[in-house]
Amino acid sequence: MATASTSTNSGENFAQMLEESLASTRSFEGSVVKGRVLAIENDSALIDVGLKAEGRVALKEFGTPGAAPEIKVGDEVEVYVERMEDRNGEAVLSRERARREEAWTQLEEAFKSSQRVTGVIFGRVKGGFTVDLSGAVAFLPGSQVDIRPVRDVSPLMGSPQPFQILKMDRQRGNIVVSRRAVLEETRAEARSELVANLKEGQVLQGVVKNITDYGAFVDLGGIDGLLHVTDISWKRINHPSEALQIGQTVDVQVVRFNPETQRISLGMKQLEADPWEGVAQKYPVSAKLKGRVTNITDYGAFVELEAGIEGLVHVSEMSWTKKNVHPGKIVSTSQEVEVMVLDVDPDRRRISLGLKQCLSNPWEKFAEEHPAGSELEGEIKNITEFGLFIGLPGEIDGMVHLSDLDWKRPGEEAIADFKKGQVIKFKVLDVDVEKERVSLGVKQLSDDPFASAASNIKKGKVVTGTVSSTLDSGIELDLGGGAVGFIRKAELSRDRSEQRPDRFAVGEKVDAKVTSVDNKTRRFNLSIKAREVEEEKKAMDQYGSSDSGASLGEILGPAMSKAAEAKEEAKEEPKEETKEEAKETQKPKKGGAKKAAAKAEEEQEATEEEPADSVEVDAAEEAADKPA
């Protein structure tokens, strides 16, 4: 009985000890324990954690991603016990999970206190990257890598970087981190410090952040500045990408800074020597130079004389003859041309150049070969409302004005005789080299009928003409030989009641006195009234006096009738008469004059017998009728 009792107690004790042993063993599972490296075999390390069996851990778990493991025999390491024994009788250990458990604890504290953590980007996944946070694997979205989009993340991978934990869930094992948040915070601090010390003229170093058509944005370390395309270099740059690349480190100078808007204008060319210094001495006016066409616009072409110095050849200075042609049809980009300096303005940084000045002037050549008075032939290039344009030697044009087409007909009528493409003869009237004009004439090929008529018809002469037309303002007379005369309405008669153009008929002969010659309108101004006054004055001088007391009508009546009869007789007599017949014809005129004088004396005596009132009236009428 005693033996049976003892046997029962020892069995219970063994079961209790086994249970205690198993309980202590189970307490190791799921915990982090310390172990010692016994050996390193192939790609794993044999680790003793104080249990009945050793465990193996892959060597890659002892190093950071992308780096060789740093472990040797005898090192003490912390490992995570997943199971005490597998089917091979070995403990299942994990160094990675041990690190992860330790890291999770530290990360939770950092997340609660909003502290930064250090990690290494070691892999790329969809939408972002994986980051090792001392054993814990976190997700880094692509938008949180940097402040600006990064095309190549290779330089960032494998090196420790600061991160900010945005979100974490230990149960699911999710951690989301951001590198951008750290950079923005650092950037804000650097920006405040930079803005406080920023001054115009200060030289800084920056990184090209972005390139646009109008310039480049440069990161100065917390704040961006604009580097305009015109401030990149002294020479012409069509696009910033010709001189800059994204990510390039450049030295820039602060050109302008607005503290209120915090806008910064930067410049690179300001760090170089200004090529415009002493430009007036280097490029004097009238100097001929060679340059390269860098840009062509609607209004001209830019020619580079040296690096950083360009001049403009205006479209009007490109050709002597091609006026309404686009500059691109005269020169091309990158073409080397010879130009002349026309003007230099160092203050406005402008140089005016001329291309045609290096070529012979066709206007000067034409003036030398064909002076005024030369007769030529040419083709009508164009017909306008004010004249004809005719092609001349040297690819220039001359103009025949409407007034130079015909001596007799108006230009509007004469221009109908000409057609485009017709070859005509003309005379050179004038060449204005400065204004680049050549005046031509067609009617000048023949003599001017007005000039020949004007040489025979002088002012004060009485002429006979034929009425060609009647107007409200007067009448026009054909004086023969192409000469035209005009009598104003007020000059048609001495008597106002007779100053009517309608009392003259077309074709009627009229005698009138020339009062003036109008070279501009090419006609003679005539007056019947002046002729009548002149005839009356002559009659007064010949047949009466102011003291006679006889009326003017009494004196002139017989004299004018006799003159009219003599004129009619002269028309009826043969054209060829002897001198004796002419003398006999003049004798009756003398007798008639004597009779008229005698009659005038008798009328004067009769006037003296009349009352005084009548005499005063007659004298007043006589004074009114006398010409001044």
Image (cartoon, rainbow, N blue to C red):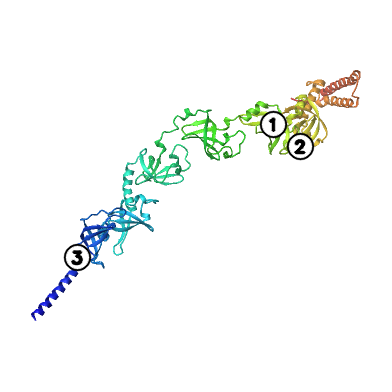
Q: Please name the residue shown 38% across and 58% down the image.
A: 127
The residue pinned by badge 1 equals 440
Left or right placement of residue 551 versus residue 374 in this view: right
The Cα–Cα distance between marks 3 and 2, rounded to whole angstroms, is 145 Å
User: Splitting the image into 4 quarters, where does residue 417 fall?
Assistant: top right
First in sequence, mark 1 or 3: give its number. Answer: 3
Residue 105 horizontal side relative to residue 13, left or right: right
Name the spot of residue 310 as percent of width and height, x first: 49, 35
Outermost residue on the left side: it is 2
Q: In the image, which disc is placed on residue 471?
A: 2
Which type of secondary structure does the marked residue at label 3 adopt? loop
| Mark 1–mark 3 CB contact (< 8 Å) | no
Alpha carbons under labels 2 and 1: distance apart: 34 Å
In the rendered image, residue 575, in percent from the top left (x then y), is placed at: 89, 24
Of the two numbered discs 2 and 1 on the same chain, state the one appearing first in sequence: 1
Mark 2 element type: loop
> In the picture, which quadrant includes the C terminus?
top right
- Quarter of the image for the N terminus: give it: bottom left
Q: Nearer the viewer, residue 475 or 408?
A: 408
Which amino acid type is marked by label 3? Lys
Residue at which label 3 appears:
52
Question: Label 1: how many residues lie within 10 Å, few (<14), some (14-19) or many (20+)?
Answer: many
Mark closer to the observer (2, 1): 1
Up the image or down, 13 lies above or below 426; here it is below
Q: In the image, which disc is placed on residue 258?
A: none
Q: Mark 1 and mark 3: span between their CA atoms?
A: 126 Å
What residue type is disc 1 on? Leu
| Rendering coords of residue 228 (x, y %) | 43, 42
Say which quarter of the image contains residue 28. bottom left
Q: Secondary structure at mark 1?
A: strand
- 10 Å neighbourhood of mark 3: few (<14), some, or many (≥20)? few
